[in-house]
Amino acid sequence: MIDSSAFQGKKAKYFTLGCKLNFSETSTFGKLLGEMGVVTARKDEQADICLINTCSVTDVADHKCRQAIHRLVRENPGAFVVVTGCYAQLEPEKISKIDGVDLVLGSNEKANLVQFLSEGFVSRDNFSTYGTDKPIATYGAYKVGATYKTVKTKDIKSFAPSCSRGNRTRYFLKVQDGCDYFCTYCTIPYARGFSRNPTIASLVAQAKEAAAEGGKEIVLTGVNIGDFGKTTGEKFLDLVKALDDVEGVQRYRISSLEPDLLSDELIDYCAQSRAFMPHYHIPLQSGSDTVLKLMHRHYDRQLFADKIHRIKAVMPDAFIGVDVMVGCRGETPECFEETYEFLNGLDVTQLHVFPYSERPGTSALSIPYVVSEKDKKERSRRLLDLSDQKTHAFYERHIGQEAEVLFEKATRGRAMHGFTKNYIRVELSPADAKAEYDNQLKAVVLGDFNHDKTALKATLKDG
């Protein structure tokens, strides 16, 4: 049983790197600790507890994780420091050697983070010791001092529920975790384990709770969301239909869907649904069939194009974001040009471009053709320029139109902003903005671009 009395009035700092799923999980950890009496420390305060939720999608992410750990240890002397997330799963031994780290939790153990933290925080020096002769890099772990309890990746079974908004207006609902795809460049299956999910009934209950708290928009998050149902025998489309019936939630967004799991039936349902927004994020990774095969992706470029055309046929104003990786092994100049021309000809809105990063233990390392860092940067620049052109054109088409915007609390010195149904960022001038507009849906008329071309200025329709 957890003794919460030791946590009353303690202060915590949280630092998250990586995807929306990580941010959702951190927010939930913060909520659980808050229920035990822990308060979030201000920037100028020292914390008693520091939680770092890590990412390991690239070597840059690994470096940022280590920097964050060192900084929080330095700025909060004597704090109990917990490290979890993908980097903690993949490199627990390396993290354990960082001065000041007290607890390292792998993907299976983080579901019981509060329990482990309670044991460690109350009596930092009284821990059972564990040992393993297994290769650390392929195991989840929790560590106290220099000891570990490890779980093989294939044995990661736990699912940590998460539905929280942190300091944002929208809620993030974790509907799935893990991945069975094992793309050649990716370590996520080793860091997160195999695909698993909770029941539709439990997720509907969490959505209802969010609505009762005043939540109007929920983003569905996960590692491979379209794979929902592996654990329970249910279907992602059935989940979408059930959530669509939850009263009070006025908007849902799907954070990312693999193209081979984005069925026409799902697209058609969302097009006429009550609350699912015309907003998609679909990972492409490459527009070259040669490279897609090297990556072990589950589709070709024709299937991807067919999905884009299907969405635009039933939702002409849909916002479509696309993940693209540049410079992976095997991406010759000819393959990159195929990708560029393919994307140039697609009616998509925004490209999320990231350079390939070599990850230890991945099968991509056996592919002989290596792209130079210089070429990666040039390819990234070209695709980012293309993305800017497409986003600008998408926004420009909507100038002068009426839209409904869910506004968010303005940060100091910045205009109040929000998003339309199809994810156009909108700004209200300080003269028009009011604090009570936070988390409120307002009808607006979309105006011209703001000063840095990142949003459209808007006026209230009844203003």
Image (spheres, rainbow, N blue to C red):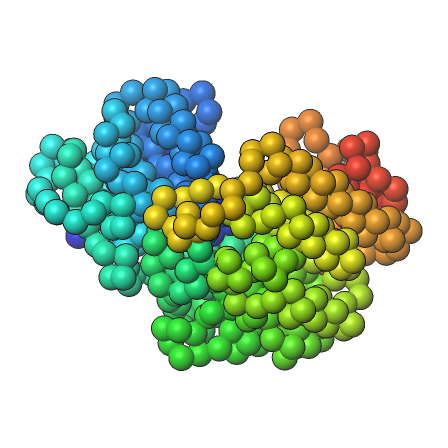
Residue at screen point 68% across, 53% down: 339
Residue 372 falls left or right of residue 138: right
For the question of whether residue 444 can be seen, the reply is no
Q: Position of residue 218 (x, y in %)?
A: 57, 58
What is the total number of numbered labels drawn onto the structure image? 0
Relative to 69, is 462 above or below?
below
Residue at the limit of the structure toward the front, as seen here: 368
Residue 212 falls left or right of residue 78: right
Q: Position of residue 375 (x, y in %)?
A: 62, 36
* Nearest to the observer: residue 154 or residue 407: 154
Q: Position of residue 396 (x, y in %)?
A: 86, 48
Residue at screen point 8% across, 42% down: 129
For the question of whether residue 339 can be seen, the reply is yes
| Residue 71: quadrant of the picture | top left
Residue 300 falls left or right of residue 429: left
Relative to 287, is 90 above or below?
above
Residue at screen point 10% across, 40% down: 127
Q: Position of residue 42 (x, y in %)?
A: 45, 27
Residue at screen point 78% across, 72% down: 313
Residue at the limit of the structure toward the right, as seen here: 400
